[in-house]
Amino acid sequence: MRQRGWKQVLLVTSVWHMPRSARLFQAAGVAFSPFPVDYRIDPKRPLTLLDFLPNGAALMETEMALRECYGYAWYALTGR
């Protein structure tokens, strides 16, 4: 960034990863504009009874959320 004279970068990542990525960029002293992508839900879609029943896709989403939590914990433990 310094060599190119950049003052700020565009941080493009999944909305799931953005909070953790933003913390890493801040810790490194990098000025950035967040641009979250890959939203997994449609907030305009009404909930149905099926939304409250277990299914494979929901299990996968839970796994992804847990991985993000593991990442937060790892960075907290290692001081990043």
Image: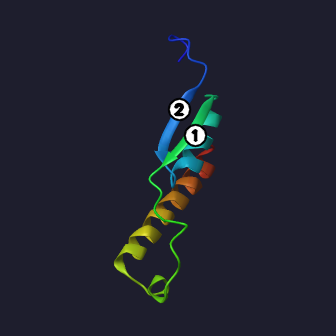
45 up-or-down from 52: above or below: above
**Residue type at the position of mark 2:** Leu
Q: In the figure, residue 69 lies in which quadrant?
A: bottom right
Q: Residues within 10 Å of mark 2 (few under 14, many from 20)?
A: few
Q: Residue at x 61, y 28 (%)?
A: 30
Q: Residue at x 52, y 46 (%)?
A: 36
Residue at the disc numbered 1: 34
- Give the image location of residue 70, x and y in percent: 52, 59
- Give the image location of residue 61, x and y in percent: 44, 68
Front-most of residues 27 and 7: 7
Give the structural element (helix, strand or loop) at label 1. Answer: strand
Q: Is residue 80 visible in the rendered structure shown here?
A: no
24 up-or-down from 74: above or below: above
Q: On residue 20, which mark appears?
A: none
Mark with earlier residue (2, 1): 2
Residue at the disc numbered 2: 10
27 up-or-down from 50: above or below: above
Q: Residues within 10 Å of mark 1 (few under 14, many from 20)?
A: some
Q: Is residue 35 visible in the rendered structure shown here?
A: yes
- Give the image location of residue 34, x and y in percent: 58, 40
Q: Residue at x 52, y 52 (%)?
A: 15
Q: Residue at x 54, y 68 (%)?
A: 44
**Which quadrant of the figure contains the C terminus?**
top right
**Residue type at the position of mark 1:** Pro
